[in-house]
Each structure stands twice: as C-alpha cells, then as structure tokens.
Image (tube, helix red, strand yellow):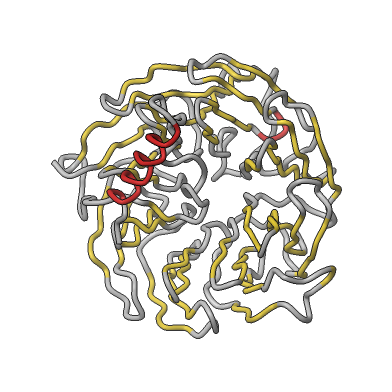
Amino acid sequence: MCNRFLLSTLLMFAAVRAGAAGPPAQPEWPQFRGPEGQGHANACDLPLSWSDKENIAWKVELPGQGWSSPVITGKHIWLTTAIHDKPSLRALCIERAAGKIVQDVEVFAPKSLPQRHPKNGFATPTPILEGERVYVHFGQMGTARLGADGKILWTAALAHNLYYGPSSTPVLFEDLLIVPCQGTDVRYIAALDKNTGKERWKTTMGGNYNSDATPLIIRVGDTYQLICNLTSYVTSLDPKTGVKIWSVANGNVAQVPRPIFGHGMIYACGGYFNPVLQAIRPDGKGDVTKTHVAWTAKKHVPQNPSPLLVGDELYMVNDKGIATCLDAKTGKEHWSERLDGEFSASPLLADGRIYVTNEEGVTIVLAPGVTFKTLATNKLDGRTFASLAAVDREIYLRSERHLYRIEKK
C-alpha cells in the first residue's frame, strides 16, 4: 500500500508548525535498503515491466567500478566508485532529473588497492545521506563526510584488513557514525563523531574471520539496539556506548546479509558454508542462544542477499536463485521456487510488489503472498550486484557501467 500522499501532507503540516522555512528536507532513500534499512520503499505507480527501449527515463554511464547502491535526496543521487588503473576512490553525485553527473569527487587516492573477491569491488559500501551531509566508506581505505557541494569535511582511517574487499556499510545513530571493522586481523565496531570523525567508542568483537554485514538499529521498548550479524554469532550493542547486550551463536563465517526486524524478532541469516536463518527475540541479556531463538531455517538460506519481511511473510532469494516464502512467526514454508540466474542484490518491496534483481541485470517481479506468482521479468544490459532503490514513481538500478532511472513513459 502506498502512503506517499499522506506522508507528504504530514511533512507539510510539520513544516508549517516549524515556521515558514521549515526543517531541512530529509533524504527519500538515505541508506542501504531504504529509510528503515529493511528494503521497503514508499513509492507509487511504478512500472511493472521495462527494457532498454521501454520505461527508461535515462541512463548515465558511470566512471570506474562499484557496487554501492544509489541513495537519493531531493534533486540528487549519490554513489561511490573506484578507478583501478591509477587508484582513486570517488563519490559521484548525479542530477536526478536529467541523469547528469554534477559531482565527481576524489575522496581517497591509495597507492595501491588490496585483494578482493571476484564478485566484489572497492566501492561496495553504500553512502549514507543526512540532510545536506553525505557519508562514504571504503573499508580499511577510509571513511569520510562530504557536504552537498562535494567538499570533504573530514576523513578517518580505521585499521583492519579485509580479505574480500569492503562490503559492510556504516549506520547513523544520533550524533554517531557507527562503522563495522570486521577484518581478518582485527574485529571491532567503532563509533565516530559524525561532525568531526573522531572516535567516540570502540568495542572488540570475537570470531576468527571477517564478516561483511551492515548492522541495523532497532528500538526495543524504550531503548535502542545495534544488531550486528557477525562471524560465529549475532550480537546486540548499545549504540550509544558500544556495550554488549546479548548474543546468539550461529556457527558460521563471513556473514553478509543485513538483519531485519519485525513481529518482535530479529531475522538474521547468511554464513559460509552452511547458511542459517535465525528468528531471535531481542529482549535478552548475555548469551541467549538456548533461550531466545524462536525458530531456525537451513533450507535455501541466502549467503549474500538480505531477507525481506512483508506482513506475516518472510521472503528470501538465495545466491543460486531459489526464492522462498516462510511464515515469519513460525518459520513454516509456504513455497519455494527457482528463479533464473544467480543473485547477490537484496529484494525490494515497492508499490505492493517484490522486485528481485539477478547478477545479469534481470529483475523479476513477484506478487507477495502465500502462493508463488511471477508478474514480470525485465532485462537490462550489464551485470549488477547493487540493490534497487525506489522513490516517488521511479526505480533506480545500478549495472556494471550505468545507472538507470526506470519509470512509466
């Protein structure tokens, strides 16, 4: 169901109460997987089908290579990219109306680039938007805050070595930018002052291998928790202090999917080489592996794509293309069907549909529900590992060489 017009009315009313100038406009798609970080878009009247010749408003060629997903605010879209020949890690700002690159900022110029996984790059973490501020992260190569004009306001370097290249994205909480640093050498979570880049707290994490998941901020009662999907365990930290609250063992390495939250439970999945999905009640203290796991699933669990919660149903698409719908409260399977291709991007709920994009640029549109139903299959040129973004009546898809704006024509 689309509530965009109700949301617009509420924002307008809030602006009137705040005075003529009103509060600064907030980004429509500010982070990886959208406003709440769970893959839900408040978008309407989206196209069901498209191709290179149908329902494409524009496509813009992107320099370099990167798999960061687009983030969107007002007139602009931000992405990151990496130039490999003469190493340069860059932030790109694209004019939303015309698809024109208006900022191409070198943020870091490392002497060399470390190793990476063949499916990864050096510009995979997604930028974060907050008002006129842009935060970008390139793993051990650095983190930075930029202004809307592209001016670099601060940079920070957090020491850790990543075997597969950078993947996890930081999260904002109040005046903190919280950065996962899950390397092969050291593993910790650090909170930086978002205004200065100075370290405010640092918590050492366990495990013996790197993890690549983006954390999620949730609210439980009157308190907030930072949910981290890590090697060997899922854990909750107090985002203000970094103090550990609870943990649940998962017995895996190299966690990638971002957790989601609903029905009073955390849904965390992933892991190599025997991925598992756990539904965890987040109201415990200490090691709650034996007491707070409501249910688990091991069949067709993804190693890379994040899950999606829609009402009472939990959806997953694993790396080999098997889509599964589970009862979110019990874990009971409603259906499991194979889709064409391999998948790394996370699914999107928008305009009452589920959009899933495979690594060859094919987006399959599914109808939510306990019965499997495919609505459309749409192909664009170029590989893609980036997740979709959707705002207003637009879908944004990043391929290997281009960013597409998809909308009804």
Q: Quadrant of the image for the C terminus?
A: top left
Q: How many marks?
A: 0
Q: Quadrant of the image for the N terminus?
A: bottom left
User: Whole-percent x and y of residue 261?
Assistant: 57, 64
The foreground one among 57 and 73 is 73
Q: Is residue 181 left or right of residue 98?
A: right
Residue located at (83% from left, 71% from top): 287
Residue 228 visible within the image: no
User: Whole-percent x and y of residue 24?
Assistant: 46, 29
The foreground one among 369 and 75 is 75
**In this picture, is 292 found above or below 234?**
below
User: Whole-percent x and y of residue 182?
Assistant: 75, 46
Q: Quadrant of residue 406?
A: top left
The foreground one among 90 and 76 is 76
Residue located at (24% from left, 31% from top): 58
Residue 18 visible within the image: yes
User: Whole-percent x and y of residue 96?
Assistant: 32, 28
Residue located at (73% from left, 25% from top): 156
Q: Is residue 215 left or right of residue 344?
A: right
Residue located at (38% from left, 54% from top): 357
**In this picture, is 338 found above or below 225?**
below
Q: Is residue 166 left or right of residue 292?
A: left
